[in-house]
Amino acid sequence: MKQTTYRRPQTFLFLVDLIRLDEILDLDDRHAAIIRAGCGDGKASSRGIKAIAGCRGSGDRLFAGLTSDATLMSMNITRKFLGCDRPALASAADYLFTEFGQSHGVDLTQVVVVVPGRRAGRRLLEMMLEEAERRQVAFTPPVFETIGRLPERLYEPQRPFANDLVQLLAWTDVLRSAAPEVLAPVFGPLAQQSEESLWEDLGETLRQEHLELARETLDFSDVLRAGQQIEGFGETERWQCLATLQRAYLDRLDALQLWDRETARLVAIEKNECATDQHIVLLGTVDVGAALRSMLAQVAAQVTALVFAPSDWADRFDAIGCIRPEIWKAAEIEIREEQVHVVDAPLDQVERVARCLAEYEGRYSAEQITIGVPNAALVPQLQRQLEQCDVPTRWGSGTSIWETGPFRLLQKLADYLESERFQDLAALVRHPDVTCWLQTSGIQGDYLTAFDEFHAQHLPYRLDFDVAENRQRSSQVEEVAAAMNWPLNFLKGTDRRLDEWVEPLLRLMTAIYGQRTLDRDVDRDRTTLLACEQIRDGILGLRSIPEELAPRRSAAEAIRLALKRASSATVPQVRDEAAIELLGWLELPLDDAPVMVVTNMNEGFVPSAVNSDLFLPNTIRQQLGLLDNDRRIARDAYALAVLLASRQSLDLIVGRTTSDGDPLRPSRLLFATDPERVAQRALLFLKPATEGETRYLEDALTATRETAAFSVPRPVEQPPITSLSVTQFKDYLACPYRFYLKHVLRLGNMADDADEMDGGLFGSLLHEVLTRFGHSPARDSTDPQEIEDVLSRALDECAREQFGKFPVAAVRLQVEQARLRLRLFAEQQAVRAEEGWQIVYTEPLDAAMQGGKSKRIAFPVDGEDFEIRGRIDRIDQHRTSGQRIIFDYKTGDTAPKPGDALKKKKNEQQKHWNDLQLPLYRHLDEASSPDSVQLGYIVLPKDSGGVEFRVAEWTAEELEAADEVARDVIRGIRQQTFWPPADPPPDYSDAWAAICLD
């Protein structure tokens, strides 16, 4: 794409004085000089410093809940209609220069520009700097303020404010101390709960409801009064309870000598204390709450509302320049048919975006294009697709701090401190930042695999090294656990006051991140640095919490509170002038890119809707004048009208389905037109997608990847294989390629998320128990109770050795299930002993659980010996006849039959061997003749009546055929014939499904 010198908005932090503006804004020397020139002799004037530093306001806080006087709404605020035939910020910049410009320059020190969000302020400042440079005039910037932070510029608070976290803890304390009968009308059975996290969640819910009502000068009592005017209102008792809790909350803050921020605003309104000597310019603030309206009414002579609409739309806006919902909801919106693109799934939306970019044919630079993404879930797919097309993007909202490494590390740390579970320790160790720290601390080796194997083998609830037979692997786990003790020691001990946790938590963060070299110009490093700064502030904020609201807490609770304080922060991405900006829907009207593509023009996204509020359903919202669905529709209708009027090119993409295939409805705003066009657009949406409309990129925007699809990798030559176990033959017969993956490359799944024994581990446990029984004196007993007692003791011993003192709950249950199977086995074993059968061979002790030594024989194939190995579970011999039977224990849920190893394939008459385990066992028993020994299974299935001794009935010819099949397998192994993969895939092959593209 063409590149220009046009510069797009980036992450600018208005937190310091003018001396550092060039660093903060990343401006070139010319722009910095213009700012300094506006301050006089190149030094920042105190007035200029105050203006910029004043942007460090506090966010919205709670409101005490009193209603403002309606007479305050009789305003004399000046409205300026700037039209909407060009981007709004360009019109705003021209207005400010014209209105406040003088012959010697433009001094906006006494101007407060109020914007819906910080991004608009950053971009407007940049545009004014460029305009000042073009005009060659001195320029002093205004103060930029968001709507939520403006009120504190209009009055003088008389007390310190309670911050977000203090407010939350005050609500939580009120809920926790209230009697269950008081809470029951609001929370029902939850009122009986005692978990701290539950109370905090409920406290946050009430805090948010409280805040939303406060913006409209309402409290919980007002909801009660309004509800009583609605027919069928059945929430009277609930809102009476909530009003009581709200009064208790305000009393709680009052006792702490703190103010609820919204209470302070209401007091200022009631006492007519709002005043300012600055000019307040409202920019794009089309939806303002009643509290701020009342405050602005008191300084109306100083307020100008810039309305981005033509003057003939004046009746669509109120006295403060906000939209009138009843008019905008019914307004017609002119959209050309060619601007609407209907596609199927989210991936089709992504590819439609790519096609739109391709169709621009390089006429616009990346800086002149914005992609609107009302559904943030589409952003990752969109970025991946455009990256493949060699088009970088930048998500304007930045990265939520809870997605960053430092935030997740502390979350995982808190999880482990609370639970001390092995899985939580493994998750902490697996965190990339901990991995980096361990490596710099001298920990080497594949310890992550060691953790996975330790968990897969022992399923520990807590770390217990007494269970570890594989000392190499367990020593690696032990080494890492010992290394982790050093930073964790900072947080050990009994509960403390919250302020006492600040230093240990900061020391922990320093230990993990303090030794790393991070570059702010590298996106990943910048994210880590900024996240650490936000978390540091959250930790330091623990010192501001009154002890009365936070009795002694554990380290995990202190971490969660610090994270809660930081959780609303975002980390902006590094600026990239070649990147296309991705923005959310509400940011689009004040974006100045001339070209725009908007995705997800669907109901629920544009307009958004909230129909499931726990306390404030839409009917109550309408009665109270809160932000309801009608206001959302009106707001989004105005936004779409502005975009249509102000862009050189605007494409609107509508999806038919979600990623799960659920249907989506097109946005109602697409049908805000005359009836004839409504019918045409409905047909457009119902028309099925045709070939070429989706999943296609124009040549002008071609993916840079050489291949667009995966293929199954072919086998490569390996060292000769000279030995096979008797069970591996089955895998080769099922699929040579998956045999190659499993036994030659030794690929398989390994994870630490299992919370119960899988079939293999359950079977190994039973095998070991039966092996110990086979070596005990009770093996010849005919008394089922004696056999059961021996088996039960052996089960307890094996379970303790395998899973330690702290097995997970599911393992304890499975052990009891195994005990039931062994009880049934004991009955059948006693009968068999009574019939004259003796156990003459059992595999060596501990072989089942530890992979003990196998029997091995040389099996000649084409004049060359090939080693076959295997472990025989058990051999029985009859006392009188001398007949020997080789048995293999089968402990799966179903009860297999030996005959299943030789079966007909579908639509074939001839039988085929699919499992050679039993036939090959007869070669491993040196004391038996292969021609006379019998073969069978001892099955211990899930079915309580299914324990059986099952003997195969194969003929000598069938067994000889099995030997020949074994020779064919060995020939294939020697020739390394591992291709192609079997289709359909065999059972139990999910571990390799991704490689085989199953």
Image: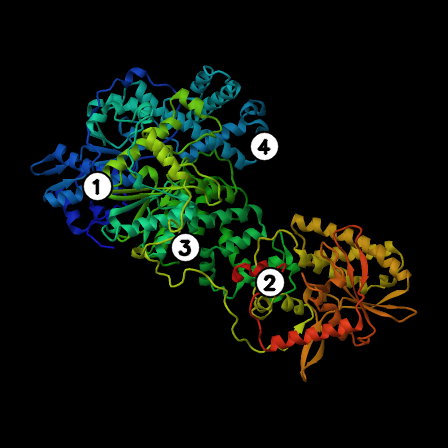
Q: CA distance from mark 4 to mark 2?
A: 40 Å
Residue nearest the viewer, comparing 524 with 869: 869
Q: Mark 2 — residue?
A: 474
Q: Earlier in the sequence, mark 4 or mark 2?
A: 4
Q: Mark 3 — residue?
A: 513
Q: Mark 1 — residue?
A: 125
**Residue 998's disc number:** none
Residue 839 placement (x, y as % from top left): 84, 66
Q: Earlier in the sequence, mark 1 or mark 2?
A: 1
**Residue 193's disc number:** 4
* Image vertical order of residue 912 relative to residue 518, above or below: below
Q: Secondary structure at mark 2?
A: helix
Q: Earlier in the sequence, mark 4 or mark 3?
A: 4
- Total marks in image: 4
Residue 290 placement (x, y as % from top left): 33, 23
**In the visual, does 34 lie left or right of 627?**
left
Q: Quadrant of residue 778?
A: bottom right
